[in-house]
Amino acid sequence: MGFDVTVLCRKQKSSADLDLRRYKVKRFSLLINKGFLFYACFNLRVFFYLLFHNCEALLSNDLDTLLANTLISKLKKKKLYYDTHELFTEVPELQHSPHKKKIWLWIERHCIHRPVATYTVCESIAKHYNEKYNLDMKVVRNLPISKEMQTYENREKILLYQGALNMGRGLELLIGMMKHFPEYHLYIAGKGYMEVALKKMASDMQMNDRIIFTGNLRFDDLHALTSKAKIGFSIEQGESLNYRYALPNKIFDYIQAGTPVVCSNFPEMRAVVEGYAVGEIFTAHDADSLAQLVKNMLGNEEKLFEYHKNCIAASKILNWENEQKILQEIYA
């Protein structure tokens, strides 16, 4: 749309060099990189950077960047937009931290009406915010750019999870079920604070050779891995409203790669997976039940091929080329 974009983010010791991009990226090295003080530190760096750099508009990505952007928007009288990728105050990490949750709710309540436009990833989250704060929050789903799709015939014996390695993602169930699939490898693509515990679990089960932790992958490498997998998983667990309303990117990444999906029995995920008939819904909460569902899928090649063909059809609809029009209307 002709904007000159600069993305502000953090750089960690483990951060790889970025691919060449069509926009500028400013990465802050922070003294504190976890816990509530990390968010305070990051917002301070963002605030002072924006204070001394000119811009015409601000985009706050999630609640953890909204405070700094709101203050600059008021000081400089600049338009602010708000893109929330989740129901931040309802993430599992805050469910047992009422004091931290109160602070985030205070920030949300005092900043949410400053943006000239707000948008999120699915109808359930938009409805929640619209009813709670009397907003007109739009929905812009995180859909991937259309990619070349590999055939299903030559898939390897790979089961795949991509995404953050955090609480409530069902990762323990995935590792636990692997004892039932001695011929398969489970690839876990991503990073998060549970990585050490999950690696220990895999080691304790003596499955280090079959459970591969790839860390964060570049976009093309992640798509190449996804295109080799037999099944992709998005099995968030728990009572967190954030997960109940979630519509994870990975579901659409699996579809774009032609990879059948197993997802949680949550409304937004179920609507996509059942609506486009691209996989199965996991309704239980234990590793053995998950293993049985996967066994049934892997034992029915005809059904898997049908899911793959449905992914091909769905990918022509569920792509960024179509979805970007909504975002363009918001900024126009």
Image (spheres, rainbow, N blue to C red):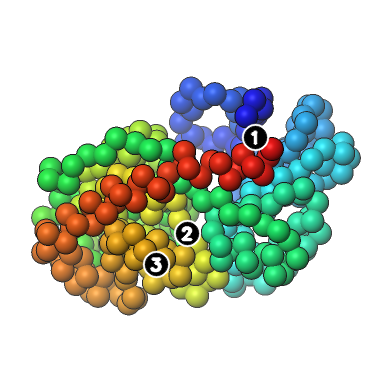
In this view, the residue in front, 300 or 292, is 300
**To which residue does mark 1 refer?**
8
Q: Quadrant of the C terminus?
A: top right
Q: Residue at x 12, y 63 (%)?
A: 300
Asked where in the image residue 102 lies, by quadrant, the reply is bottom right
Q: Earlier in the sequence, mark 1 or mark 2?
A: 1
Which residue type does callout 3 highlight? Arg
Of badges 3 and 1, the one in the foreground is 3
Vertical relation: 94 (above or below) 80:
below
**To which residue does mark 3 refer?**
270
Q: Is residue 193 visible?
A: yes
Which residue type does callout 2 highlight? Leu
Q: Quadrant of the N terminus?
A: top right
Asked where in the image residue 301 lies, by quadrant, the reply is bottom left
Q: Is residue 105 left or right of residue 202?
A: right
Alpha carbon distance from label 1 to label 2:
25 Å
Q: Secondary structure at mark 2?
A: loop
**To which residue does mark 2 refer?**
247
Of badges 1 and 2, the one in the foreground is 2
Q: Residue at x 18, y 42 (%)?
A: 151
Alpha carbon distance from label 2 to label 3:
9 Å
| Residue 275 percent across, percent down from the top left | 36, 63
| Residue 322 percent across, percent down from the top left | 48, 42
